[in-house]
Image (tube, rainbow, N blue to C red):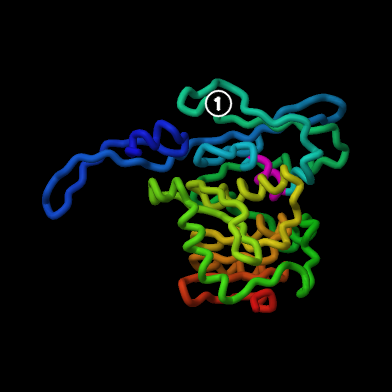
Amino acid sequence: MTNNDLSKHNPSLFNVDVKRIDKNILTNFSDVLAVEEPLEIRLDFEKNNQREQKSISITMRTPGNDFELACGFLFTEGILTGPEDITEIKHCGPILKHLGHSNVVKITLEKNDKLNLKSLDRHFYTSSSCGVCGKTSIDALKTQNKYSQVNDDQGAVFSKELIPLLPQKLRAAQDVFEATGGLHASAFFSTDGTLISLKEDVGRHNALDKIIGEAFLAKKLPLDQVLLLVSGRVSFELVQKASMAGIRTIAAVGAPSSLALELAREMNMTLIGFVREQRFNIYHGEWRIK
């Protein structure tokens, strides 16, 4: 299949004509890029016996799994507690021809007196690179997170021989990355190395929201029996989102940040970085690796 054919069949891909100079020789060829477009997340909810709509977030994302992305974001921000909170989720607004739907997702909520309306007072703008900046403190996150009380014996144990094999399994399953070289990925693996799920996006936080949102909608939380592997570095935000979903073990191809490590320690999570073919670093939680 040509690059042009790929982009026609996949809304995550965009075909472009490129001029390449190689050894001072100019050539023309067709390439594909990862699509980046805005997604607005709206909530329809009841307040003081009246229905209200509020725009919660605008995130720059790669189209695909929009419902999962929206639910994962709202859950990890503490706005949603379970799929039973939702009566309807749909795209709304003008339909874009290349997508077959709009760039707006509306989630209608059940009447719920326990809805965290304070969380709705913030308006989030999320870029594909840095996510939501200026997050609440670690102490506030621990209060908000219903899976924050983690003991050493909670969470699955993974083989030290297995960990170095996972990046290759991740890369082999990244269809859009294979075509573009331009996407981040988040994946769940079982203790025997089986790839359970994988999501890709131009934003590393979006890829994680998509895969957590998928589990959220399927009522598979907490995710304490899987290993989360991310294709790049590990930021504070990724650890925060993972902890909200009950994930106990995070591994990354890249490095963790200092605040990511601090949060992993506070949440008693296993944090692994620089996973290579024959080595990796354990920054915290070595008891889950045998």
Secondary-structure class at tag 1: loop
Q: Position of residue 26 (x, y in %)?
A: 14, 45
Which image quarter: residue 260?
bottom right
Q: Position of residue 122 (x, y in %)?
A: 68, 42
The residue closer to the viewer here, 76 or 212, is 212
Q: Looking at the rendering, in which quadrant would you find the C terminus?
A: bottom right
- Asked whether the viewer can see residue 266, the reply is no
Disc 1: which residue: 101
The relative height of residue 80 versus residue 53 in the rendered view (above or below) is below
Residue shown at the point (61%, 57%) measured from the top left: 188
Give amino acid for label 1: His
Which residues, given as a range, are shown in magenta? 70-77
Residue 128 belongs to magenta span: no
Residue shown at the point (73%, 44%) measured from the top left: 218
The residue closer to the viewer here, 56 or 205, is 205
Residue 76 belongs to magenta span: yes
Categorize mark 1 by other alpha carbons within 10 Å: few (<14), some (14-19), many (20+).
some
